[in-house]
Image (tube, rainbow, N blue to C red):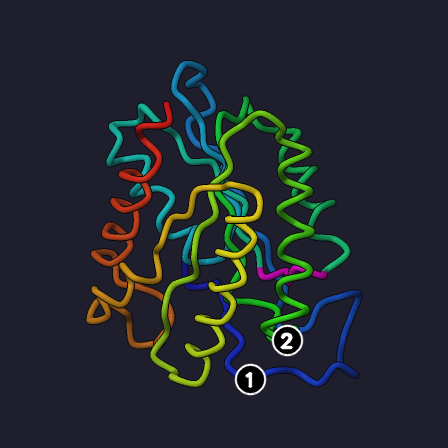
Amino acid sequence: MNDFTYEYRDKDKKDMYKGLYETYGWDNTWIERLSNKESKRVLYIGDSISARARRPATALTGEKILFDGFATSKNLDNPYFKKALLVFEEQLIRTDAVMFNNGLHGWHLSDDEEYYFYYEEMVQFLSEHFKGLPLFIVLTTCVTDKEREKRIMERNRSAVRVAEKYGLPVIDLFTVSKEYFHLISQDGVHFTPEGDEVLARSIVEAIQDKF
């Protein structure tokens, strides 16, 4: 888990490389229990927060629901985001539901018009590609940096607007993360293992009735 990164300062756009606006680019993919073809499967698309909460969520269900994961540092306007996701999705045993979050990356985007535009574009893509499957919008968790947190709150408002427009359920991890603010680790972004489990519990409670 130590290889996850968070960009504390926005990079100059002149440093852009193939749509990447951060110092490091990474994808973290995970297919849970390849031999298990009976349990329901949720594809959790997100960032390092989602990657850390995914396995505790699986454990909390007693592996009745398996959380496969595509976590990435790619911003919403990165031209390789969808391509990389589709390559990963082809390898999955199956998908019964999808969860989506992308709030802690892509800080070069304005938090109102640009973020909303690309967020809606991604939701449209996911709705069409995973047509007929439950799609959950996951709000971004808080951070200790107050200025950055203001931006996160604005992005979450955009995410809720998109969810309401398309009639999609919202999993409010921001409110949960504020309630358990004391469980944020020293980096000011990620949570302690106990915090990861708190987020996982909220996720499981939100989706288990859908199966």
Q: Is residue 74 magenta?
A: yes
Please give left or right for residue 127 compared with residue 17 in the image.
left
Q: At which x and y percent is residue 67?
A: 42, 35
- Tell me the kind of residue under disc 2: Ser
Main secondary structure found in the magenta portion: loop
Q: Quadrant of residue 139?
A: bottom left
Q: At which x and y percent is residue 29?
A: 54, 44
Point 78% across, 71% down: residue: 17
> Which residue position is annotated with label 2?
110
Image: magenta residue range: 73-77
Please give left or right for residue 28 compared with residue 121 in the image.
left
Please give left or right for residue 182 compared with residue 110 in the image.
left
Q: Is residue 9 magenta?
A: no
- Tell me the kind of residue under disc 1: Arg
What kind of element bears circle 1?
loop
> In the picture, which quadrant includes the N terminus?
bottom left
> Which residue position is annotated with label 1?
9
CA neighbours of label 1 inside 10 A, class few (<14), some (14 to 19), many (20+): few
Q: At which x and y percent is residue 19?
A: 76, 66
Q: At which x and y percent is residue 74?
A: 63, 60
Q: Residue 189 has which mark?
A: none
Q: Quadrant of residue 26?
A: bottom right
What kind of element bears circle 2?
loop
Point 49% across, 71% down: residue: 154
The CA span between labels 1 and 2 is 15 Å
Q: Nearer the viewer, mark 1 or mark 2?
A: 2
> In the picture, which quadrant includes the C terminus?
top left
94 to 105, vertically: above or below: above
89 to 163, vertically: above or below: above
Q: Work out whether mark 1 precedes mark 2 in sequence or the reverse, and give the earlier one.
A: 1
Q: Quadrant of residue 208?
A: top left
